[in-house]
Amino acid sequence: MDKLQSLNDLVDKPIDLYFYNQFLNQINKDLIRTGIDIQNLGQFSPKELHEEIQLLIKELLSTDVKKLVALFYLIDIPEKYLQQSLSTDVITPSETISFLILKREWQKVLTRIKYSQK
């Protein structure tokens, strides 16, 4: 698997099933640790996953920004990226933030798999 550079890398390219399951497990684990439960996460296609995360971010932006910041902290995304994504006019903040979350989770799984093979 390569680095996740854009949303198209997740949605349009074929993904190894083992890697994708590890990716979903990592996302689910971090969401649950933040007190967020997305039902049937393991059944989502990459596109559905992005859409569901984006809906979650929209909800957190309007109802619980503290939980969103806690999620960023737990996933290990610097708060400056959150601030940058909220100030951009290119795409919606929820789309940018959801991609940052997916990208960081992707990196975590890549690193874990890389070092578990050595």
Image (tube, rainbow, N blue to C red):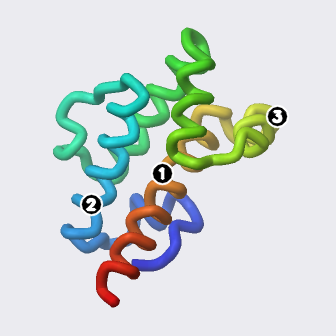
Query: Which dot, 1 or 2, sits closer to the camera?
Result: 2
From the top left corner, tell me how far across and down residue 109 is, in percent: 39, 65
Q: Position of residue 55 (x, y in %)?
A: 45, 27
Q: Position of residue 102 (x, y in %)?
A: 48, 51
Q: Give whichever of discs 3 and 2 has the lower sequence position.
A: 2
Mark 1, secondary structure of its residue:
helix
Disc 1 marks which amino acid? Leu
Which circle marks residue 87 in the picture? 3
- The amino acid sitting under disc 2 is Gln
Horizontally, is 86 left or right of 60 in the view? right
Q: Give whichever of discs 1 and 2 has the lower sequence position.
A: 2
Q: CA distance from mark 3 to mark 1?
A: 19 Å
Query: Seen in the image, is 104 located left or right of residue 88?
Result: left
Q: Amino acid at mark 3?
A: Ser
Q: Residues within 10 Å of mark 3 (few under 14, many from 20)?
A: few
Q: Mark number for residue 33?
A: none
Q: Residue 44: x percent and y percent? A: 24, 45
116 or 12, which lies in front? Answer: 116
User: Do the numbered discs 3 and 2 sit on residues whose CB atoms are within 8 Å?
Assistant: no
Res. 22 mark: 2
Q: Specify which label sits upstream in the sequence, 3 or 1.
A: 3
Disc 3, SS: helix
Q: Is residue 2 above or below residue 85?
A: below
Who's the residue at 58% across and 67% down the image? 5
Instruction: Measure how far apart labels 3 and 2 are at the Cα level.
Output: 32 Å
Residue 32 falls left or right of residue 81: left
Residue at image x 70%, y 46%?
Answer: 78
Which mark is drawn over residue 102? 1
Which callout, 3 or 2, points to the residue nearer the camera?
Answer: 2
How would you rate the neighbour count of disc 2 (Cα within 10 Å): few for under 14, some for 14-19, many for 20 or more? Answer: some
